[in-house]
Amino acid sequence: MDDKQLSSISLNDAEEAFDALMQGETGELSKILKETPIGQSIGVNVYRQTSMSALVNAIKETFETCQHVLGEDYFDQCATSFCQLYPLFHNDLNAYGSDFPGFMVELVESRAELSSLKFLCDLSALEWALNEAFFAPKKHAFDVNKFGTLTDEQRGALNLKLGPDVRLLHSHYNVKDIYTFHKDEENIINDHSFEVTSGDYYYVIHRGSSKENFELFVDQVDEYNFAVLSAIQDECCFIDLCENFAQNVEGEMHPPPFGDYISKGIVSDFVL
Amino acid sequence: MVPSSLNAIKSAGLGFRMPHFADIMKRRDEVPWIELLLDNWLCEDGIVADRLEQLIKVFPVTFHGVGLSIASSSPIDEEYLQRVKVLLDKSDALVYSEHLSFSRTTSQFIPDLLPFPFTSKTLDHISEKIDFVQSFLNRQMLIENVSAYIDFPNNDFSEEEFITDLVKRTGCGLLLDVNNMYVNQVNLGRDAKSALEHLPLEAVQEVHLGGHEDAEDYLIDAHNNKVCPEVWDIYQQTIDRTGPVASLIEWDNDIPSFDVLLGEQQTAQEFLNAAQITHPATDYSTANEMKYG
């Protein structure tokens, strides 16, 4: 019998042993346990498997398209490696996986068999953005009336705000097409192949304009609109947006299409 | 402190899971109350808050937490508890329950309900934390017995002795999970019938019923099956002693059709209807009011 078994086990002992278990070390926990009808090792493995599978399942649920591309077994191995490297620091599994896109970058760089799947890095970033957009707070409708009452000076100094659900993604691959392809079960069942093209792709991920609508959208925009929305995200003031992004249309200078952003719910507020 | 108000119901409810949202809203008359997994509903806005608003308009709700980690060595996370308080208050929650386990260590969260040694020190520590939580929330909480797959040596108490003392010291209520009792009987050799004789059944305000996975040599508390006959038997023995008590069907994995879930709920209700006939009414809520003034 180990020395620790001669005295009572403390909560700290138990916590340290479970921490070690999450790193794959079963010995720390085994040595502070007593024998049971099912056997110590079975019991320890149940905790190891249930805890790890809860984390892995959270990753699989969020990064479903990456899983389709890699295949379930390979993805399971990747997700398990991720979960061992990145512990859960809060108790919300829906918010677990923010580091997964970065992990995919390292994985793709380090594994020869993934050299033709470099788009996985951006695809995982798209899936994380969709997850964040889904769980984001409800947005307010843009207060057009209040905006109309502002003086020119106030208007010039204000900051437009993107909706809390809006995420911007610059990808080097057509990840929206890849994502959409894998969402169609017909393509999966019939084992259709998909086309990967490289270039500059600009995406706006959001939940649309309806306050009650929780449908997710991935809009592909051009470089100009992406730059405007990025400037809004970076808190560029209204007058600078108008000046820096004025467009020459048939000899007349026009501001960016703020009305379009507002009607789509991409811009949902402003602060003075 | 406000006592739990679930004793007013004493019927069979359902653990709500999101895939059944449309079904449960359509068939609301068949479900007397629902239990929500608290940690899934802490968002103050967005789709989660929207669904919650719709559910609490229609159903009496109880909240069952997994994130408090009452048996951690570290203090209660007050920021988390404040969010719990806001949710319970805005939802007019009948009950707040948590597990007698830990899920937080000093370095991480582990998504499981982990067991701990039943010692005098842990009893003192957890009693203080329950006192703190009940005082912070200004309401009674229920503590649930958990399933386990390992056991610690040199415990000062059996599980039922530990729970009895916790209830005595803190005035918390008991959420008795009869499936967990059966799982522990098979896995750890703890006798469920004997446990029922020693537990403070007068404190039981809710019973959980769920299915487990049979791994041949042991059972996993996976909440992925119908309630098995052995667990219905422990349930019968429980309500023979307690009389009718709010009872809940839990099904979290491999979620079946809503009809299957309702079938389980109706079976539990039949047990309760029979218990109603054989037991004179016992109003524990009055006893709680006396205790908490």
Image: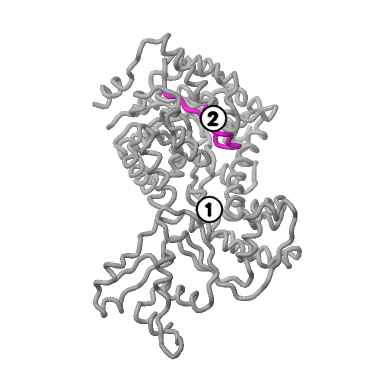
Q: Which residue is mark 2?
A: B261
* Residue B59, horizontal then vertical, whole percent: 39, 34
* Residue B218, horizontal then vertical, whole percent: 66, 28
Number of callouts in the render?
2
Tell me the element at label 1: loop
Q: Which residue is mark 1?
A: A96
Residue lying at the far front of the rendered structure: A250
Is B230 left or right of A163, judged from the image as shown? right
Q: Is-magenta flag for residue B15?
A: no
Crowdedness of circle 2 by 10 Å Cα count: few (<14), some, many (20+)?
some
Quarter of the view holding residue B61: top left
Quadrant placement of the N terminus of chain B: top left
Quadrant placement of the C terminus of chain B: top left
Specify the amino acid type for callout 2: Leu
The residue depicted at 40 percent of the width and 68 percent of the height is A262
User: Start and end of the magenta stretch?
Assistant: B246-262
Any part of residue A251 in sight: yes
